[in-house]
Each structure stands twice: as C-alpha cells, then as structure tokens.
Image: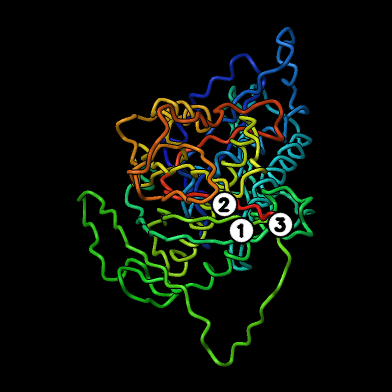
Amino acid sequence: MGRTYIVEETVGQYLSNLDLQGKSFVSGLLIGQCSSQKDYVILASRTPPKEEKNENLKHPQDKLDNLDEEWASEHANQVSRMLPGGLLVLGVFIITTLEVGNDFQNTLRRLVFAVEKAMNKKRLWNFTEEEVSDRVTLHICSSTKKILCRTYDIHDPKSSAKPADWKYQSGLSTSWPSLECTVHVNIHIPLSATSVSYPLEKNTKNGLTRWAKQIENGVYLINGQVKAEDCDLLEGQKKSRGNAQAISHSFDVRMLTPLLLNSDHRSTATVQICSGSVNLKGTVKCRAYLHSSKPKVKDAVQAVKRDILNTVADRCEILFEDLLLNDIPEKKDSKKEFHILPHRVFVPVPGSSVMLCDYKFGDESPEEIRDHFIEMLDHRIQIEDLEIAEEINTACMSSSMNNEASLDNTDDEQPKEPIKTTVILKIRHNIGVIAAFGIAVLAAGISFHYFSD
C-alpha cells in the first residue's frame, strides 16, 4: 500500500478554481509536512507563467512535452525560502484539460526530481535515513475531474511510480504547535588566498557549512527543559475536548552551544593565508511547526535546527542576488564593507495556525511584500496581518575604514536618502540570477574585510 496524503480542504478548492487561461495545462507546487505514517498538504501554489520574449508567439510552451523544469525548479527555490521549519515542498501538481497517456508520467517524474535536486543544492543540512524520501506528483484532469496521485523515491533515480491516497480534511492545521527560537549569530568566515577565484557566495556557503555543524551539535531546551528525543512533544499539554475550539500550543526553544572542553576531545589549529574575511553578526528569529498527531521532541528540534540554518543561508543568498541584480560594485579600495541583511516577516495562512515568512530590506514597502506573496504563492494576504519579528532598521549600505556599524543601534547617522536595494520581485528570464524577494527580521549584518598587501 502506498503513502497517504491528508490534504487541507482549501487546497482542493484552490485546485478546482485554478483558471488554465486558455492553456492546455498549469502546474505548481504542493507544500506541507512529512511524517512516518502519512504526509500533510496544507498549501498549493501555481508556478507563475513565464513571460515570453516574443509576445507574438501564442503559448509556445503550451505542450506538455515543453514543461519548463528549470522555471519550475526556480519557483520551488523561491518558495522554499518562504517556508518556516517543518514545512517542505512535498511535490508537484499539474492540471490538464484532457486526459493524457502514460508517457506523461515520465514528464512528471522528471519534474519532481528536478525540483528536489534544485532545492537540495542550497541546503546546509541533509535528510536522515529515517526520513520519508517519497515525493508526490498529482495529476488532475479539469474536464473529467479525475485525480491521479503517485509518489517517487527521490533517493533512487531509477525509482518507479507508486500509487498514493489523496484524502481531504477540513481544519487540518488549525492546531499545529509552533516552536519559536531566538539565536545570536556571530560567524567569522576567512577567505583563503588560494580560493580567490571562487565567488564570494561560494566561499560564504563553505563557511556556513562549518558553522552548521555547531547548530547540529547544539543542546536545545524546550520551555526551559531538556526532553528525551522520543518523548511526545505535547505530553502534559491541555487538549481540546468535544466541539471546543482547537488549542494551538506554542513552545519556547533555546539553543546551547557546547564548549569543547572535554579532555578526550583533540583539537587542532589550522593556519591559512587569507585575502579577507566575511563576518555575520546579529539575532535571528526562527519558527517551526509540527503536525498535531503525536509529534516527537526529536522532530521538533530537527525542524528548529533546519529553520536556523535555512534563514541564515537564505538571507546571505538574497543579499548576494541583490548586489548582483542592482549592479552594486564591491569596494575593493576599502578595507571594510558593511551590508544589512534582509529582515524576516511572518504572514498567517488563513484558517491555519501556521505562518509563512518572507524577507525584506528596510526600504521595501508592505505592498511589495503583498505582491510577492501573490506572485510566488498565488495567495492574497492582508497587509495588517504582517508580523515583523523585530524592529527593522533602515536598509542602507556603507563602507568604513575604521568604524563598524552597530546592528542594534538605531541612533547611528542614517543617510538622508537610503540607498535603494530592493530585490526584484518577479522571476526573470535570466534565471541564473533569478530575483529573490526579501523580507526578514534577522537584524543581522554582513561585513566584508579586505586585507591590504
């Protein structure tokens, strides 16, 4: 028997109401959470249509064989930044006007593998052997309303399709428990003189990979207590009874980084010639969600860890894309550059206890946030529902020879007209430098130091 997908009813309504706009098909992403017993789908998002350079061509990619895997993969990358800990892109859906043959399943298979491969490249963490490796493909025929749900094992490139059950349920995530964690970040990344040919982004990711090990090895307190991994997260919590409104529990998580003072632990020092360094400093607001069906402590801790890693890596990536897209040159003649990383903003999912997130630079407006949600997730949000995790300072860029800007001090002299660093909201055709939208409350900064000869 295949896997079972429990799906929020509003997802079914969304898929039924999707307008194909005269095309033969429309595709998108399925978002939710995996568990050992079943998977939960709480959101579906159509992939934005790609604007063609030659507008005289009428639907040049309207054939199923021309499904753009690269475009869909980049959309998945963008959406993955907007997911808090515990949520994943579980697979893809496609709606066609007519029933299709078995050959079409090969197209869906290639698509789901391409999407997962693209997202896996940017992660600072790896899936464990115990985790579910199945990803879903959902095909709906708009004329017959027939649904075909199948899964593929993404760890096996030769895996064949397996049937899966697709079941709707109302109020699926109305009482999912949330976990909140504040992490102070102070990461020093030396830039080796032997790797000057590497892009700054690649050097930074290598440094973050080393930092990720500290996050993985940390000790996590839940509501001030260390709990056994296999313990039920909701143990001792009040439960709703009868027709009473579902209770959504919230947990405070604190991370302790172990000191390597054990005499049995041998440490070595590495000496390397450096051409510069990257410093990441600030405070990160993290959030994760778990399904309410007997969630385990180990799953909660894992979701928080991954949100910490994702949000720091995503903000660095957004900044580098912003520098590239806005053609902001590196100040090589300066010994120090200072940049404000984007801040995190949370937005509630209607009818759910889950909140999605996004990232913004200080000079971006709430309207831009709203527009980006519409574009990436195909869902409207209310500006008044935006939850800013921390106070946002002006997103200005500066370079300094002697002074380092303070991340938390808003009394520093600000430019009369802040430098515009808004990230482009739309997916561009030059997909290699695809725009990353930004909104985040990581009041963190990134500084680049260049050593003189």
Q: Say what secondary structure mark 2 lies in.
A: helix
Q: Which mark is residue 86?
A: none
Q: Which mark is residue 275?
A: 3
Tell me which label, 1 or 3, sits earlier in the chain: 1
Q: Residues within 10 Å of mark 3 (few under 14, many from 20)?
A: some
Q: Amino acid at mark 1?
A: Leu
Q: Which mark is residue 313?
A: 2
As measured in the structure, the alpha-carbon distance from the residue carrying label 1 to the one carrying label 3 is: 25 Å
Q: Quadrant of the N terminus?
A: bottom right
Q: Taking 392 as reference, is 287 above or below it?
A: below
Residue 2 in the image: state x and y as whole percent. 61, 55
Instruction: State the residue in front, 171 or 204.
Output: 204
In this rendering, does residue 288 appear at all?
no
Q: Taking 56 as reference, is 338 above or below it?
A: below
Q: Amino acid at mark 2?
A: Ala
As measured in the structure, the alpha-carbon distance from the residue carrying label 2 to the one carrying label 3 is: 22 Å
Q: Quadrant of the C terminus?
A: bottom right
Of marks 1 and 3, the one in the foreground: 3
